[in-house]
Every structure is written in structure tokens, then in C-alpha cells.
Image: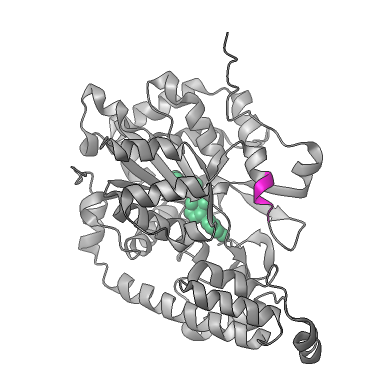
Amino acid sequence: MAEATPPEAAAPAAPAAEAEEQVVNPWEVKTGSNQGIDYDKLIRQFGSSKVSPELLERFERLTGKPPHRFLRRGVFFSHRDLSSILDAYEKKEPFYLYTGRGPSSQSMHLGHLIPFIFTKYLQDAFNVPLVVQLTDDEKFLWKNLTAEECHDLAYKNAKDIIACGFDVDKTFIFSDFDYMGSCPDFYRNVVKVQKCVTLNQARAIFGFADTDCIGKVSFPAIQAVPAFSTSFPDIFGREKNVKKVKCLIPCAIDQDPYFRMTRDVAHRLGHCKPALIHSTFFPALQGSQTKMSASDGNSSIFLTDTAKQIQKKVNKEAFSGGRVSVEEHRKYGGDTTVDVAYKYLTFFLDDDAKLQQIKEDYEAGRMLTGELKKELIGVLQAMVAEHQERRATVTDELLKQFMTPRPLCRAA
Ligand code: TYM
């Protein structure tokens, strides 16, 4: 008899020593190492799979698209069942993309851009519908904000998301506060998931405490159901075979606990398990021990920052892998494994040859920290200014179009 597979949500707990060293969950990311999270360890701990060169090669062959720098450089490093999505693409079977944002701040930061930039690339590569969940309800439950403030932030953040270049004919963005009340199919799925997960399981996955309000305990079901096509009858219809439409979720790996739970209940509800592709974290300015986070303004560069603010933050805050004096730096070179300015360039400087040159020059001591930071400041200022220009063109009318439940164009 075949051995039963253990549920993913409860699966491979890390050995105690490993678990103590680094913490990665939807609310906290930290490690004692200044080189950042050990992602191989995380793959073992979470039980996901590494994005392999063979998988990338297949992706490129099928889509005809050169791999995004986030794939070339291992930013999107881990996955669950990505090959099932490539199979669907190859067989011309329908699937869609799902990602999200918890609107807790007026502006998103550079870290939040990572999944959205990549999702836009995937939408272009696969030519499929995308749903974007804005969890204003989640942020109301977790943060010291009113429900009205969170709802308002959802709309503000939606403009930043639209400015990433999504195709209005293929994208539906929704606030939970709006959509839960207007779509019975969505709410029905939420309750079905809630019935499948016990309090014990929720505690084991999310670490809820006795003092947590019951809203928090029931929330994960709301983040789960956009992974089920039947939650979007306006997009996919209500026919029986809708359940066969697969889902791929791009996100940073902090969101994985939600989707381990989702994958565990999917079959019981007659749905396919959603596939995932996970990114590493864009580090805080102060170093890779933690991720850039909206709740720590000093750690972040926001999409609303001016050119001057970007320059000031990078020069003042970005942790340097340079040596204590110019003489030492020239002699021994800088350490790119801990240098935040260099790490940021690996995310945003597209030119592989230039990045390699910078690495060599910095490590050999030919390039100083100030020069490296200057390179980064130029790249970020241009990128943020372009984003701000695009955001200024997002009218309320366009926002309404994106946020109206409606049929979306689907690949033939
Ligand atoms: P939120 O708002 O915390 O983050 C939004 C997205 O950005 C990713 N992210 C980061 N990626 C790289 N580096 C960082 N420093 C960084 N900080 C955040 C997150 O992983 C996420 O992909 N509960 C979710 C909202 C949500 C969601 C989803 C996210 C609802 N449904 C489906 C992903 C997929 C949240 O609060 O995300």
C-alpha cells in the first residue's frame, strides 16, 4: 500500500536548532546571520522545491520568453507544483494567477514591488487572467487602524499595483470588504474552508495565541479562497468544469503558511491544489537580518519617496560591506554578501554584465562604498520616478474598471 502523504501545513517542522536561528512567517522575518535568510534551509523546513535549471529551461522553451532577472538570479527560488502549471500551459488548459497585498500603509515599498513586477512578467508570458486580493480586513484585524482606513488604503495601494503595468482586460483587483459582501460564491468557499480546518491546525500553522481575537483565527480562509476558481463566477462562469481551472500564486515565501493550508483542503473541496512560486526577501536598509517592512519606516524606501529622500536613505542607512578605511578597502575589497546596496542592485539592475563588473570591482577594492551607493541611487531614483509617473496616470475611472467584477480575456 502506498504511504499516505503527510499534510503540507503540518509537514516538515524544522529541527529545533534550525527553527531558532531564523523566523519566517507572514508577520515576522528575521535571522541572526548578516548574510540573510538561509533559503535552502527554508525549503527543507517548508517542504517546497527548488526552482531548478531544468524547470527554467522548460519555462523558456514553452513561453518563448527569456527568464526574468528574478529567475536568472534566484530571487524566485522555490515553488510548489510549478510543473503542473507548465503542463497546463503546454496543453492549452486554462489557469490563472493570484497574488495580493495587505494594505497597511499609504504607500507600498520596494519589497512589495517584487511579486508584482514578477506577476506582470508572468501575465505577459502566459497571457492569462490575474486576480489581486487586497486584504483590508486582515490589516484591520492585525493593525491599529480602523476598517474605513484600511478600505481607503486598499484603493490607494491598488493604484500602485495598476502602475506596475497590468492589463486591465486580464486583471481583477478586489478589496475583501467589498467583494466578500457582494459575491456569495466567494463567501461560500470561505465558510467551506473554515469548516475543514480545526483550531488546533490553525494554531499549529499560524501560531495563534489564546488572546488573539477570533477574527484572526478565521482570516486565513479568506486568503485561501481566491486560489479556487469558483470564487470568481464573473471571470470563470459557474459551469461544473470551472473547478479544473488551475491557479498559480507568486508571492514572497512569508505567505507560504496560508497556502500550505489551502493546498491541504483543496482536494476535499474538489479543487486542484494551487501552485506557488516563492521569492526571497528584499532586505531592510539596515541589513539582511530582516526584510524591508512597511511597519518600520526607517527600513524602507517607499514608492512615494522623492529623489532626495532616496539618496539620503541609501547614503545614511544602507548597511555597507565596505572596509573601515579607504586604504583597507583598496587592499582587501568589499563584501558583497552583506552589502545592502549591492543586494538591491541584484534585484533592480537588469544588465548582467554591468552587475558582474560592479561585483568584481567592489570585491577587488577598485570600487568604494560611496561609488556603489551612487550606482544604486541612480537606478532607484529612475525606477521610482517612472513608477510615480505611471501612477499619476491611473485615474479613478481606470481604478474602477480594474475593481469591477467582470469577465476577463483568457488565452485561446
Ligand atoms: P503584504 O502586503 O505583506 O505583502 C505583499 C506582497 O509582497 C511580498 N513582500 C515582500 N517581498 C519581497 N521582499 C519584501 N521585503 C517583502 N515584503 C512583502 C509579500 O510576500 C506579498 O507577496 N496577507 C498578504 C496579502 C495577500 C497575498 C495574497 C499575498 C492576500 N492574498 C496572495 C500574496 C499572495 C499581505 O499582507 O501581503
Q: Is residue 321 above or below residue 274?
A: below
Quarter of the picture containing the N terminus is: top right
Q: Is residue 281 magenta?
A: no
Which of these two is toward me, 411 or 267?
A: 411
Q: Look at 62% across and 68% down and name the residue there.
A: 299
Quarter of the picture containing the C terminus is: top left
Q: Position of residue 290 (x, y in %)?
A: 67, 59
Q: Is residue 220 above or below residue 319?
A: above
Q: Is residue 388 above or below residue 163?
A: below
Q: Position of residue 164 (x, y in %)?
A: 35, 64
* Residue 150 visible in the picture: yes
Which of these two is toward me, 329 or 354?
A: 354
**Outermost residue, bottom side:** 327
Tell me which corner region of the image, top left, top right, bottom left or bottom right, holds residue 320: bottom right
* Residue 153 visible in the picture: no
- Which span of residues is magenta-colored? 37-41
Left or right of 149 in this view: 246: left
Which of these two is toward me, 84 or 18?
A: 84
Q: Look at 57% across and 62% down and name the residue there.
A: 282
Q: Position of residue 315 (x, y in %)?
A: 63, 83
